[in-house]
Image (cartoon, rainbow, N blue to C red):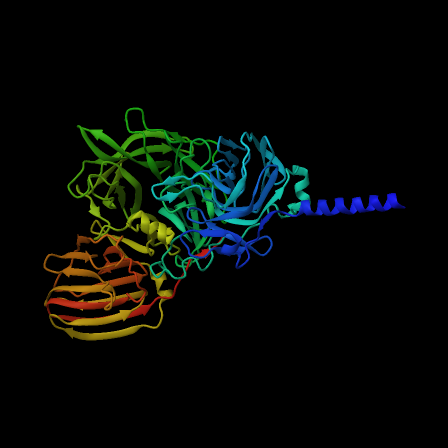
Amino acid sequence: MRTTLIFLAALGLAWHVCKAQQQPIYQCRFEPGWTNPVSGHVWQGRSEQPELAEGLIGRALRLDGYSTFVHSKLKRAITAPLTVSAWVALETYPTHPAGCFSLVSDSDPYITAGITNFGQPYIRTSGGRVVADVMVPKFRWQHLALIVDADSAKLVWNGQIVAATANGRAAAYTHIYLGRDAAAGFVHIFPTMHINGLLDEVTIWEGAKQPTELPKWISMEKTGLDADLCIPAGRFAHDHTRPQYHLLPLANWTNETHGLLYYNERYHIFNQKNGANVFLGNINWGHFSSPDLIHWTEHRPVLSPGPGYDQMGIWSGHVVPDEEGSPVIFYTGSDGTVFSICRASPQDSSLLSWGKSKANPLIKGNPPQYHRADLRDPYVWKEDSAWYMVVGYGILEDSTEQGALLLYRSQDLTAWEYRGIFFHHKPWPETPGIFWEMPVFWKMGDKYILLVNPVPYQKKPARAIYWVGEFKQERFVPDHEQPRHLEIINRLLSPSVAYDEEGRTTAIAIIPDLIPAEMQYQRGWTHLYSIPRLWELKDSVLLQSPHPALKKLRGTPLQRSKLHLQEGDTLAIAKGQQLELLLKLDISRTSSFNLVVGKNAHNGEATSLHFDLEAAALLIDHNKSSLNPLFEKRKETGIFHHRPQEPLLLHIFVDGSVLEGFVNNKEAFTTRFFTTDPVSDEIELVIQKGSLQVLDMTVWPITPAKVSCGF
C-alpha cells in the first residue's frame, strides 16, 4: 500500500512537472493593451500606436515592412535548449532578408528566423545564414518555429524541418525582436530587414521540441488559411495630405502605371509597387481594377521578382490584347547585369492571377552593336499583320548621347526580331534626352502620337514629351522637329493610355511626390496617379481634359456669376481638401492674377498659382506652401497658350496634397503641396494688375472615392 502511494505521488509529481514544461515561458498574443511597459514590450515605428488586425485567435500585429517592430526584454535570460514559434502571414516579401523574430543576448550572439526577398525561410546566427529551399506563400497563415539545442538550430516551417545550422556559441538570450532581424540593414534612411504582414501567437518554450511534437502545441489546421492583410483604417486617418479620390496604393511605394485596359466590362491598370517599403526597390507589378475609372480596388500583385532573369525587379512595360483578345503583359526584367524583355499571361478571366512565360526572357540584353546594357519599358502594338515592340534606350551617335527607341517585330508575340532604331533625337536645351523611358505609341485618326520620358540629366528632371507623326517603313517620321511638352508644369509623367468603354482615348499617369526621404518615411506612402483624362488630337497638338466619369463624385455645387474685380481685390472662393472648381474669366483687361490654394491665414501657408497673361506664363510659387522644414521651397514655371480676347476657362481639381488643372480643356498642369494643418484649405482669387470679370464660377465638394482592399 505504501509502495503504491509513493508510486502515485511520484506519478502525480511527474504529471505536474510535465504540465509545467508544457507551459511557455513567453507568449505574446496581441490583444489591446499588450504593449504595457511593465511587461517589457516596446513598440517602435513611424506610428505612435501598434496596429492590430484580425488574427488566428483574437488580434494579430500588423507590420508595415520597414518601420514597425517590437523589442521585448525577457523576464529572465534563457539558454538552449529552447523552442520559439510564431504564426506569420506576409503581404509582400521583404526588400532584403527580414526577420520574423530574433533572440538576442547581451554579449552579442543572436539567432533569427526570417524570410528572404524571394520568400524563402532562413536561419541567421552571428556566424552566418542558411536558406531553405522552399517558398512561403503570401497572404496565408504559415507557422514558423526555431528549435535550438546546445550545438544546432533547426528551422521548422509548417511542421517540417527546412533548414539547419550549427549553433557554436552558447548564449543567454535576454531580448526578443518581433517583426525584424536582429541584424540591421538600410537603403539610405530606410530600414530593410523588417517584414510586411501579420504576426500572431509568438511563443517560447524551454526544451528543444521535436518537429513531430509541435502539432500537440500548435493547431496545424490553421496552416494555409487566408489572412486579412488589408491596411488598417487608422493608418492614414489623420493624414489630410493623402488624396481621397485619386488612385494610389493602400500604402508604401508606387511608381509608374502601365497596362491600362478595359476588359470583360472592367478597367484594369498595373503599377510598379514596392509594398515592403517606401523607396524604389523590390518592384512587383501591382494591380487595380474598377467598374468606372473612379472607384478602384487594389488586388494582390500579379508578378513578383524570382531568382534568375527578373530577380532585380519586375519593371515597367505594357499590356496588349493578343489575337484572341486576351491581355498579355510585356515587362522588363533584370538579373542585376542583363536587362531582358519578358511576358506573362492571365490564368483567369478576372486577371487576378498571371503566369510568366516559359520562353522568358524573350529578348535578352541589348543589340550587340550598341554598348549600353540597360534597355527597358516595352510598348507593343499591331500594324497590319505584324506585331511591333519599341523599347526605351539611349545611343551614342556623332559623339553625342541621345534618347532612342529600339524596334522589334514578331508574328506570334514570343519570337522577336530586332529591326533597328525606331526613332532617336539629339538633346535640346529644355529636354536633354540621353535615355528615354516609358514610350507610348498611340494612333489617333491617321496620325501617331509618340510619347517618351527622358531620364533626369545634368540636373534637369524627367519630363513627358511627344511628337505627332507617321509610321513609315518601320520608322517613326515626325511632323515637327522639336517635341512638345505633355504638361505646362512638369509634374506628371509616364501616362498609360487606352480606350475607355465608349472608345475615347483615356490616360492615367504618375504624379510624383518630389519630397525628401525623411518625409516619405514619416508619411508611409509615396506617389500617386492622376485623375483619368481624355486625349484628343487637333492640328497636331494633344489636348487634355478631365474624364467625365469624375462628375459622379460631385456634391451640391456653389455657383456665382458676373463678379467684377478690380486690381488688388481678393475673392474668397471656397474651403476644403477635396474640391472641383470651374472658373470662366474675362481677362481682356487683366495683365496678371493669382489663384491661391492651401491657404491658412493664421499660419501663413499658401501656394500661389500666378498667371502672367502678357507672357502667357504660369508660375507656381511654393515658398509658403508648407511649414514643414523638409518641404523644398521652389518655383515651377511653364508656358500656356491663350488668346487674351477670349474667356479663360480654368478647371481645377484639389485633393489633399495634389492639384490638377486644365486650361481651356486643352493644356494641363499638376503640382503638389504638403500643408501642415488640415485647415490650410482656403482657395481665393487675387487680382494683381488690371480688372477681371468672373463670368461663371462653380465649386463642387468632391465625395471621397478611396481605393478598396482586394487582398
Q: Residue at x 52, y 32 (%)?
A: 131
Using residue 57 as the reference point, say whether residue 642 is left or right of it.
left
Q: Residue furthest front?
A: 2
**In this rendering, is residue 93 above or below 581?**
above
Note whether residue 17 is visible.
yes
Q: Residue furthest right?
A: 1
| Residue 426 sits in quarter | top left
Q: Residue at x 52, y 49 (%)?
A: 198
Using residue 371 as the reference point, say whether residue 148 is left or right of it.
right
In percent of width and height, residue 476 lies at 25, 38
Report the front residue among 225 and 629. Answer: 629
In percent of width and height, residue 383 lies at 34, 39
Note whether residue 383 is visible.
no
Report the front residue among 242 and 152. Answer: 152
Q: Residue at x 32, y 49 (%)?
A: 518
Q: Residue at x 35, y 33 (%)?
A: 409
| Residue 188 sits in quarter | top left
In percent of width and height, residue 376 lies at 34, 36
In percent of width and height, residue 258 lies at 37, 46
**In this rendering, is residue 338 above or below 93?**
above
Q: Total number of numbered labels?
A: 0
| Residue 700 sits in quarter | bottom left
Q: Residue furthest top?
A: 368
